[in-house]
Amino acid sequence: MREVLLERWKVAQDSEKEYWSDFDNNSIIQESQGRNPERAKIMIEKWKSLININKNTRILQIGCGPEDVINYFKIGELHSVDPLADFYKERFKLDYKKSGLVKATGEKLPFPDKYFDVVILANVLDHVYSPEKVLQEIKRVMKDSAVFHFEIFTYQKNFLRIAKTFGKIKEIVKNQPYNIHHPYTFTIKETKLLLNNYFSILSEDIGSSALEGFQDMEDLKKKKKHSKNLKIKIPAILGLYGIINYTAICKLKNSIKN
């Protein structure tokens, strides 16, 4: 089971505080309202084919930041957790009662077993202390019929090799960890291997956070390689394409009937 040093995780958390300190109430709401209402609609539509969504549906978002998609669902009993919840509540005067925001990490969720109908982990797994522990906790709090909505930014292998090499140089020169916000970086292959340890993947999208997608990684490579924009085409050909959003809709393995 992989775990970063606790001090490295704390550095990442401090960098998150620094990042959000540049925002105020208006800029937070403006940034969030530009994408999350539509995102919420798309998510609900995807889940409806797998689970009955109603006013009693318990929905949890882990690592929601100061404002995220959890604030834009118009149905369900909403819950959210974030290790920086107290910081967000003190800095931003937003309505955190609706999303039930509490301070907690994904590695230790303050909820009983089999409690939620939907769990959302959107671009969080690369921020955590222990990815496996987070996935185990999600599995624990999901009802047998529950849906797990997962998103993460991934990278092609060659991109990561080069980025980590330059990152080591940066660590020496600036005395700052590589990719300071993210203790982890994953390829799509690594991500799917992790998910498959705990869940059955029912559907996948590769592209821009559920708003635009490709059929699979080969489809993405093919279309990028045929782009007329050399800044897109050449990295795709060389396997240097970074920030590929991967979305998966999952259920517990024992809940899938043959």
Image: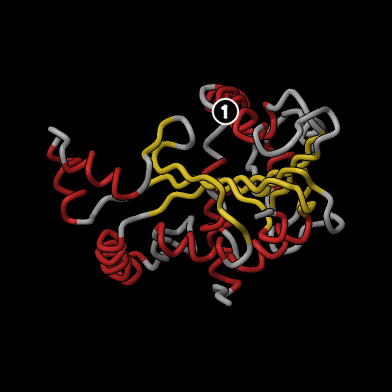
14 and 244: which one is in front? 244
Question: Vertically, is 54 above or below 179?
Answer: above
Whether residue 47 sits left or right of residue 8 in the image: it is: right
Q: Amino acid at mark 1?
A: Ile
> Residue tagged by mark 1?
42
Circle 1 crowding by C-alpha within 10 Å: few under 14, some 14–19, many from 20: few
Q: Position of residue 148 (x, y in %)?
A: 65, 48
- Who's the residue at 73% across and 47% down the image? 146
Q: Quadrant of residue 14?
A: bottom right
197 and 256: which one is in front? 256
- Who's the residue at 65% across and 43% down the image? 64
Whether residue 56 sits left or right of residue 103 in the image: it is: right
Q: Secondary structure at mark 1?
A: helix
- Who's the residue at 69% across and 30% down the image? 71
Q: Quadrant of residue 112?
A: bottom right
Q: Quadrant of residue 65?
A: top right
Q: Position of residue 83 (x, y in %)?
A: 69, 54
Q: Position of residue 107 (x, y in %)?
A: 70, 63
From the image, which quarter does the N terminus lie in?
bottom right
Whether residue 126 sits left or right of residue 121 in the image: it is: left
Residue at far front of view: 258
Whether residue 67 sits left or right of residue 183 in the image: it is: right
Q: Position of residue 187 (x, y in %)?
A: 39, 60
250 and 138: which one is in front? 250
- Who's the residue at 29% across and 43% down the image? 220
